[in-house]
Image (cartoon, rainbow, N blue to C red):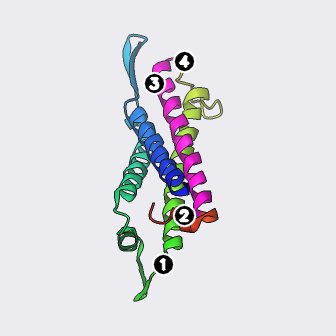
Amino acid sequence: MRRIVTAVLRLAAAAAAAVAAVVMATSHQTIFLFGMEVQANFRFTPSLVFFVAGNAAVSVCTMVLLLVPAAAPSLAARLVLMVDVVGVKLKPTETELLLARSYVLGVVLTATAASAGAISDLGKNGNSHAGWMPICEHVPAFCDRVKAALVAGFVAVLLYFLLLMNSILFPSVSMGI
């Protein structure tokens, strides 16, 4: 039963990350302001591009790890995570690989959500000290899609946190998933 819960959590986390990436990647709006065409697009902000790339990478990585046959996860994980430090190859245990995998993917999701959240707050509220005006009153559809993508991104972060806790509390159950 716990293996099923772990698999469902991983699948849900991958789906949330994929939804976040797709929603953000499709967020754009063009308006006419004072007779000039103004565009809002996620590609214009490096933080939002990072959000799309990070969420897409985590989603793909999670799906690949879910689809690796049950007999091969240790081989695949060792090929990916084996470290060669000063000629000494470290051979982590299955538990260490699982924790490292969940931790790294969770940290990537947290970083992407934090950077996109910071820049979206700037877009919503502006910064009076720097003279930056808020843009969300002019491009509400763009801001709504960014907000939806951020919600999906933070859901993915929460699911990865739950996966990490599951891996710590039940390491033998989570092996290979």
Label 2, secondary structure: give it: helix
Q: Nearer the viewer, mark 3 or mark 2?
A: 2
Residue occupying image coordinates x 45% and y 24%: 142
Rounded to the nearest angstrom, the CA distance separating label 4 from label 2 is: 49 Å
Which residue bears the numbered disc 4? 137
Answer whether residue 18 is magenta in the image.
no
Label 3, secondary structure: give it: helix
Answer whether residue 158 is magenta in the image.
yes
Label 4, secondary structure: give it: loop
Q: Nearer the viewer, mark 1 or mark 4?
A: 1
Q: Quadrant of the N terminus?
A: bottom right
Lower sequence index among marks 3 and 2: 3
- The answer to which of 77 and 51 lies nearer the viewer is 77
Lower sequence index among marks 1 and 4: 1
Q: Amino acid at mark 4?
A: Glu
Q: Which residues are magenta?
A: 138-167
Pointers 3 and 2 in contact (C-beta within 8 Å):
no
On residue 92, which mark appears? Answer: 1
54 sits to left or right of 102 = left
Which residue bears the numbered disc 3? 142
x and y, in percent, of residue 159 in the image = 56, 47
Residue occupying image coordinates x 37% and y 15%: 36
Q: Which residue extends farthest top?
A: 35
Rounded to the nearest angstrom, the CA distance separating label 3 from label 2 is: 42 Å
Q: Nearer the viewer, mark 1 or mark 2?
A: 2
Lower sequence index among marks 1 and 2: 1
Q: Mainly helix, strand or loop, the magenta region?
A: helix
